[in-house]
Amino acid sequence: MPHTLNAPRSQGSSKVHTQVVDAIGQLIVAPPFGPNTTLPNEEELCNRLSVSRTAIREAIKVLGAKGMLEAKPRAGTRVRPFAQWNLFDPDVLRWINQQHIGQALIPHLTTMREIVEPAAAAIAARIHTSCQIEHLTQAFNLMESAQDIHEWVSADLRFHQAILNATNNPLIASLGAMIASALETLLSVNAQQARHFNEALPQHRKVFEAIRNRNSEDASLWMRAILADTRALFPSPN
C-alpha cells in the first residue's frame, strides 16, 4: 500500500518549504521507508505533495544537512543509516518520536541524562542567579499543583530545562531545547508507569531545595536518585 501524505495548502513560500520538509521528514521515519531505503523519485514526491520540483529539491537539501538523506545522480535519494542522523536536531527527534523507533532512543537518552544532569544540578546550585532560581521555583510549583499527567509532564520538562539554564553554560542550556521533544516523551513514560503520576515529587523537591540552598553535593545526589528510577525502567543498551 503506498504511503500517502496530506498535501500542503497553498501558502507563503516559507510556510510551504517548512511543510514540505516536515512531510518528507515524516515519510523518512515511517514504514515502508526508513534507514537504508530509497525514497520515491522527484515526480512522485511532487504529485504526493502538490509542490514543484524546486520545493522538493530544497527540502531534500535541508534533510541532507540533517544527516537523513543522500541524493546521488542515477541512484536516487537514499535514506542514510540511522547512526548518521543528527539526533540533536529538534525536527529529527520530533519525527522519530512520532514513530515506534523513538522508544529505542530512550535508554540512550537516559545515559546522556546520567552524564549531564547531576553535574548540571551541582553547577546550578553553585552559580544560579536570583532570576534563574525564580524560574526553577515556578516550575516546581507547577509540578506541585499539577492535577493530571499532562500538567505534570509539562512542568517536569520545564523544571529540568530550568536547571540546565541555571548552569549559565549556553551549550548545556541549548541541550535542553534540542532534546525537549524526546525528553518530554521520556518524562511522560515515567509518569505513566509510576503508581501515581507525581510519585517523583519528593525527589524533585530535594533537588530544588539543594539548588536553592546552594548545596551542590545534595543537588547532584538527588538528581542521580531521580535518574536511577528512570534507569530501572529503561536498562542500559548492550
Image (cartoon, grey):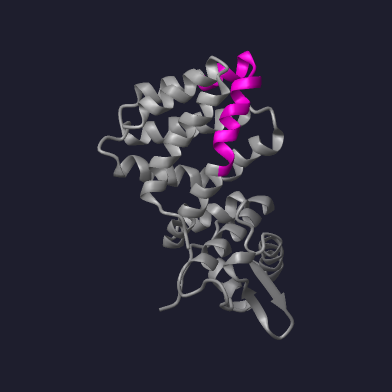
- Dominant secondary structure of the residues highlighted in magenta in the image: helix
Q: How far across and how far down the image is residue 180, in percent? A: 54, 42
Q: Is residue 215 left or right of residue 154?
A: right
Image quarter of the N terminus: bottom left
Residue 148 occupies quadrant: top left
Q: In this orientation, which residue lies closer to the viewer: 161 or 15?
A: 161
Q: Is residue 54 left or right of residue 201?
A: right
- Which residue is depicted at the point 31% across and 43% down? 192
- Which residue is depicted at the point 41% across and 54% down? 235
- Residue segment shown in magenta: 115-136
Q: How far across and how far down the image is residue 173, in percent? A: 64, 35
Is residue 128 highlighted in magenta?
Answer: yes
Q: In this orientation, which residue lies closer to the viewer: 228 or 112?
A: 228
Q: How far across and how far down the image is residue 149, in percent? A: 33, 35
Asked if 77 appears above or below 58 in the picture, the reply is below
Residue 178 visible in image: yes
- Which residue is depicted at the point 57% across and 57% down? 22
Q: How far across and how far down the image is residue 110, in percent? A: 49, 47
- Which residue is depicted at the point 38% across and 41% down? 229
Asked if 16 appears above or below 165 in the picture, the reply is below
Is residue 148 highlighted in magenta?
Answer: no
Q: Is residue 52 left or right of residue 34?
A: right
Q: In this orientation, which residue lies closer to the viewer: 224 or 171?
A: 224
